[in-house]
Amino acid sequence: MYQLTALYNHPEDPAAFDKHYTEVHAEIAKKIPGVLRYTISHPGADPEGNKPPYYLVAVLDFADEASFGAGMGGEQGQAAVADLPNFAGAGVTLLTGPSNEA
């Protein structure tokens, strides 16, 4: 399994971020060839009640690195990357690599 993890910083306007993410970005991401599973989460506060470091975490699972490369290098993958500036102005960190189940 190979994963792309997107860590989104806290946006200035959470409602606008959520609207664009749900209505536009997620729809593009769901169509990337080779995506086996796509999950998102909004991290909660830590035990002391501190704001989490990220607003939203998205994880896309691919069968292997080749599937990831083909999917992200294709039209839908490139469209997803090109869409990031449209809503993720506060910043996003993209991590990729193999994943293993514990």
Image: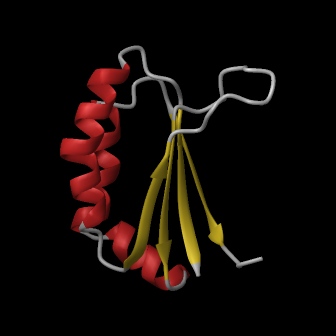
Could you say where residue 101 lies in the image, as x and y percent from the top left?
71, 78
* Residue 95 in which image quadrant: bottom right
Q: Quadrant of the N terminus?
A: bottom right
Could you say where residue 46 lies in the image, as x and y percent from the top left?
75, 30
Residue at horizontal 35%, vertical 74%? 71
Q: Check the image and report above or below for 25 versus 92.
A: below
Q: Is residue 43 visible?
A: yes
In this rendered view, identify the residue nearer to me: 56 or 32.
56
Q: Check the image and report above or below for 6 versus 74.
A: above
- How many numbered marks, from 0 up? 0
User: Image check: 96 left or right of 32?
Assistant: right
Could you say where residue 35 lies in the image, as x and y percent from the top left?
38, 75
Q: Quadrant of the C terminus?
A: bottom right
User: Image check: 36 left or right of 78?
Assistant: right
Q: Is residue 79 visible?
A: no
User: Image check: 65 left or right of 52?
Assistant: left
In this rendered view, identify the residue nearer to me: 93 or 99.
99
Residue at horizontal 81%, vertical 22%? 48
* Residue 13 in which image quadrant: top left
User: Image check: 12 left or right of 77?
Assistant: right
Residue at horizontal 72%, vertical 20%? 50
Could you say where residue 11 lies in the image, as x and y percent from the top left?
44, 21
Residue at horizontal 54%, vertical 84%? 64
Q: Which color scheme did the rendering employ for the protein?
A: secondary structure
Q: Check the image and report above or below for 5 versus 50.
A: below
Q: Check the image and report above or below for 57 versus 54.
A: below
